[in-house]
Amino acid sequence: MKIVFMGTPDFAVPSLQALLDAGHEVCAVYTQPDKPQGRKQVLTAPPVKALAVAHGIPVYQPRTLKDEAVQQQLRALAPTVIVVAAYGKLLPKAVLDIPPRGCINVHGSLLPRWRGAAPIQWSIIAGDATTGVTTMRMAEGLDTGDMLLTYETPIAPRETAGALFDRLAQAGAALLVETLDRLDEITPIPQDDSKSCYAHMLDKTMAVIDWTQPAAAIDCLIRGLDPWPVALTTLDGKRLKIYAAAPVDGHGAPGEVLESAPKKGLIVACGDGALRLDEVQLVGGKRMQSADLLRGHAIAKGTVLGG
């Protein structure tokens, strides 16, 4: 099957690799333009581009797919199917209509739940018990096309968005290959729009912890924002990032430090229950276990975080 692959971040890499391993002809890869990254703003290629270049696959990085010249280029490639995995751009109807077998998307949720840009993170933030991957025929709406196959998995109690991201990337790759193998026999299933919800893109404003929330909800937020943008609060006016925590018993004013000793841990009261902060990073310092922080940075009981 002649395929044009469209994808950008790490999530899409296993899907592209799986297509190559399965012997499909990937005639071209479309990905986002290179972007500056890091403090030095070094121009960096997307992960999908790096894999495509390693396999000698032509790479195209248009800023928009609405351009007629870009669409004509796609038509000239004459793909049987276009496969999309976390590309980051909507496909206009003119592009959707190009391949005779349609456009197939690998989406990191059990649609119609969590349509949008950050479904994996939001499944954890919302406290979902399960999530998964869906392959779908793409339509003009945002993740609204008919579903083809699904893979469902429980979310582990301490699982972070980063860990779940890696698991679903691999699961999505396997589901994609199965979808293409069985494309003639799969009956597409329309989505129930009444059950949909939107997973909007993450931003740094979400990272500030509201200690009036229940401990369980804050725990989900911390895990859902790892590895980016990372949940945070303030300690004596200084930013304190929180990478790992766990709900524990405890009562006090929201944000109040209830325990602060290396052997007992750093325990903070929430609106309901308390959190033990396990892995933190004080501004200007290194990421570390909270016990190590407390050995070199005394935090008095009764201190209020985020105040």
Image: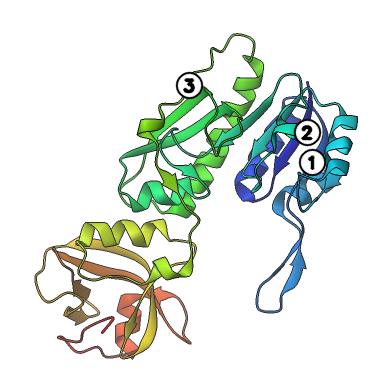
Residue drawn where x is 12% and y is 63% of the image: 249
Q: Earlier in the sequence, mark 3 or mark 1?
A: 1
Q: How is the image coloured?
A: rainbow
Q: Amino acid at mark 1?
A: Val
Tag on residue 190? Answer: 3
Residue at left 78%, top 22%? 80
Q: Left or right: where does residue 134 sit relative to residue 80?
A: left
Label 3 and label 2: CA atoms lie apart by 25 Å
Q: In x, y percent, where is residue 289?
A: 36, 73
Q: CA distance from mark 1 to mark 2?
A: 6 Å
Label 2 SS:
strand
Q: Nearer the viewer, residue 35 or 240?
A: 35
Write down the residue under mark 1.
29
Residue 152 found in image quarter: top left
How far apart marks 3 and 1 lie (CA) works out to 28 Å
| Element assignment for label 3 | loop
Q: Secondary structure at mark 1?
A: strand
| Any part of residue 56 in sight | no
Disc with the residue nearer the chain's start (1 vs 2): 2
**Is residue 260 left or right of 306 when viewed as pictured?**
left
Furthest residue in direction top, as rendered: 185
Kind of residue sitting beneath label 2: Val
Q: Are marks 1 and 2 in contact (CB under 8 Å)?
A: yes
- Looking at the rendered structure, which numbered label has been put on residue 139? none
Marker disc for residue 4: 2
As rendered, which of 299 and 74 lies closer to the eye?
A: 74
> Which amino acid, mark 3?
Pro
| Residue 39 can be seen, yes or no | yes
